[in-house]
Image: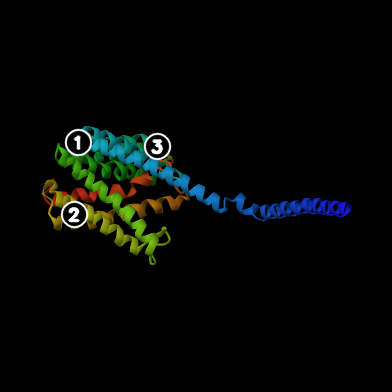
Amino acid sequence: MAGKKARETQATSTRAPRSIDSASDNLERRREAREGERVIGGLRSQRARSWTEKFLTRTTSGTIYVLCVLACLFWGRFPTMVLITAMAWLCCSEFYRIVRLGGRMPNEFIGLAAAVLYPVVALFRPEAETAVTLLSMLAVGTWYVLTPRASIADAAVTVFGAIYTGLLFSAVVTIRASEPGVEGALLALGVMGSVWVNDAAAYLVGSRVGRYKLAPRISPNKSWEGLVGGLAGSVLIWLILAWLGVQDINPMLAVTGGVLCGAAGVVGDLFESRLKRSVGVKDAGNFMPGHGGLLDRSDSMLFASMTAYFVLRFGGII
């Protein structure tokens, strides 16, 4: 009897290490089979962690951006001008970085100076923006004549960069300065907010129900369904401005402003996307973690804000 128990104990002790070794071998084989996915970050846990990190980074930098804009808009016209001037300078700098990658040689000193002047004169003497354009063209023309290695394309992108960023961005300053109190801040916020909502609604609608591509060679993720959703979101913000009675905006003007600004924002987005694609870069810069450069975050705003200015101007609001 004692011998039988001893044999059973010995057999059990023999099987246990073999079972443990087999489980360890299986685990090791599974790890080796998934090593390729692990190297490229394709495991489910890795994808979840990566998505969470990107989401938190993008949300944090976006929140800081929005809070800075809100603080300056409601603080007053001068802080708004300072903020937009800084944004115009950085966007212009990122634009010149892109065109340099494309082989152009812009005069950044002249271009950045003009980009900074546009928002400044928009606060004090909006009509002087034409003078800024003239002076920048004269300066670039002189530089082109005196610099044999400069091409006409270099001169053109120098002037265009300042107009594209500084002049278009100055519309936000003009809109904010149209009324010194809270209504001016609400109007400028409504214009900027309509662009933000347009982008967000276009992404949400397009990612869920988007089937027909809007511009597959430039921005493969954009769809016609997303475009409609974005325009609806833009119109909604403008209608809220009308409902709040901000500077007597009427519903017809609100619908017009929402549609035109939403469409202009899409053009601005596609314009910058093609600009980046032409030189093979994903982002214009790395100023805003999770978003890329400030130009990536402001591409829609540039075209839409100037469109809003003309809508409000011809509508008799400012």
Q: Position of residue 299 (x, y in %)?
A: 34, 48
Amino acid type, mark 3 = Thr
Label 2 sits on residue: 239
User: Which residue is rendered at x = 17% and y = 41% of the image?
Assistant: 184
Q: Nearer the viewer, mark 2 or mark 3?
A: 2
Q: Position of residue 193 (x, y in %)?
A: 26, 48
Instruction: Kindly state the secondary structure of the residue where label 3 is placed.
Output: loop
Instruction: Tell me if label 1 and label 2 are in contact, CB under 8 Å.
Output: no
**Figure quadrant of residue 207:** bottom left
Q: Residue furthest bottom?
A: 212
Tell me which label, 1 or 2, sits earlier in the chain: 1
Residue closer to the observer: 285 or 168: 285
Label 1 sits on residue: 123
Amino acid type, mark 2 = Leu
Q: Nearer the viewer, mark 1 or mark 2?
A: 2
Q: Position of residue 157 (x, y in %)?
A: 36, 45
Label 3 sits on residue: 147
Quarter of the image with the N terminus is: bottom right
Instruction: Tell me if label 1 and label 3 are in contact, CB under 8 Å.
Output: no
Instruction: Kindly state the secondary structure of the residue where label 1 is placed.
Output: helix
Tell me which label, 1 or 3, sits earlier in the chain: 1
Query: Residues under labels 2 and 3: Cα distance?
Result: 52 Å
